[in-house]
Image: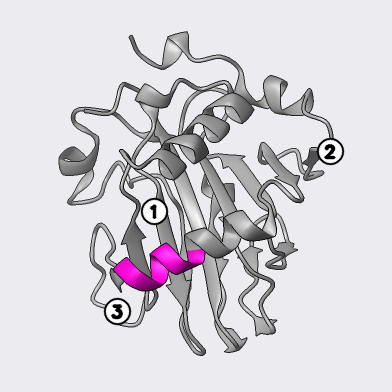
């Protein structure tokens, strides 16, 4: 099975009550408020706090301050994580077998993830390492777990869109163009937190079954 068998995620998302499409012809991008409850957000925050580690990047560029957050790999066999994974799949229409393990991220004051894309650069040194089996990333789904006191917005520079962290809010986007090529308009910057902490969880899907 490959991505030819994937359903049209955007069409499915448009059928979801409360979903909002970002008005840009350059990107398939959607938002949904209150995707998770406060209690669900708190439980994920507690897990991230317990199991966090320094974040890493593919294709290191020599900038040691490019990504300064911390990451938590959620245990995909735990019942609450399985339930969250099933909710992502139900929302997107993409089978769970195409998904990477869910990650959590934590940002302290001053931490950020500078402008980047979620897809792997086809010309990058690590492209074969990350894409030889499951293929390129297709969709990204991200949930803000708290409303940040100041800063911490996600800026999509190419389409001039700034998204503020809001507890329980989900944003998602297609990392590819309609022809299947990667979409540079998905370039985004997890901006510095100015006050408080920022927590998110992220789910990525691939072209082929995740091994």
Q: Is residue 22 above or below residue 191?
A: above
Gap between marks 3 and 2, in whole Å?
Answer: 39 Å
Q: Is residue 20 above or below residue 6?
A: below
Nearer the N terminus, badge 2 or badge 1? 2
Gap between marks 3 and 1, in whole Å?
Answer: 23 Å
Residue at figure coordinates x 50%, y 30% from the top left: 86
Q: Nearer the viewer, residue 78 or 179?
A: 78
Which is the main secondary structure of the residues drawn in magenta?
A: helix
What residue is shown with label 2? Answer: 18
Residue at figure coordinates x 45%, y 9% from the top left: 5
Residue at figure coordinates x 28%, y 28% from the top left: 210
User: Dot 2: few (<14), some (14–19), or many (≥20) neighbours within 10 Å?
Assistant: few
Residues shaded magenta: 45-51
What residue is shown with label 3? Answer: 63
Quadrant including the N terminus: top left
In terms of secondary structure, where does tag 3 sit?
A: loop
What residue is shown with label 1? Answer: 103
Q: Nearer the viewer, residue 191 or 12?
A: 12
Residue at figure coordinates x 42%, y 59% from the top left: 104
């Amino acid at each position: 099975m490959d991505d030819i068998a994937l359903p049209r995620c955007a069409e499915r998302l448009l059928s979801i009550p409360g979903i909002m499409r970002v008005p840009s012809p350059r990107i398939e991008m959607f938002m949904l408020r209150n995707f998770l409850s406060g209690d669900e957000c708190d439980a994920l925050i507690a897990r991230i706090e317990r199991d966090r580690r320094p974040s890493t990047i593919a294709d290191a560029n020599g900038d040691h301050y490019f990504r300064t957050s911390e990451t938590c790999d959620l245990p995909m066999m735990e019942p609450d994580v399985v339930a969250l994974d099933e909710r992502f799949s139900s929302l997107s229409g993409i089978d769970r077998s195409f998904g990477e393990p869910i990650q959590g991220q934590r940002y302290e004051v001053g931490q950020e993830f500078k402008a980047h894309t979620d897809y792997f650069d086809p010309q990058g040194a690590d492209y074969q390492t990350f894409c030889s089996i499951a293929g390129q990333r297709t969709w990204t789904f991200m949930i803000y777990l708290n409303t940040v006191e100041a800063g911490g917005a996600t800026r999509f520079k190419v389409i001039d869109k700034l998204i503020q962290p809001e507890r329980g809010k989900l944003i998602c986007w297609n990392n590819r163009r309609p022809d299947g090529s990667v979409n540079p308009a998905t370039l985004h910057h997890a901006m510095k937190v100015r006050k408080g902490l920022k927590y998110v969880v992220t789910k990525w899907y691939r072209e082929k079954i995740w091994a």
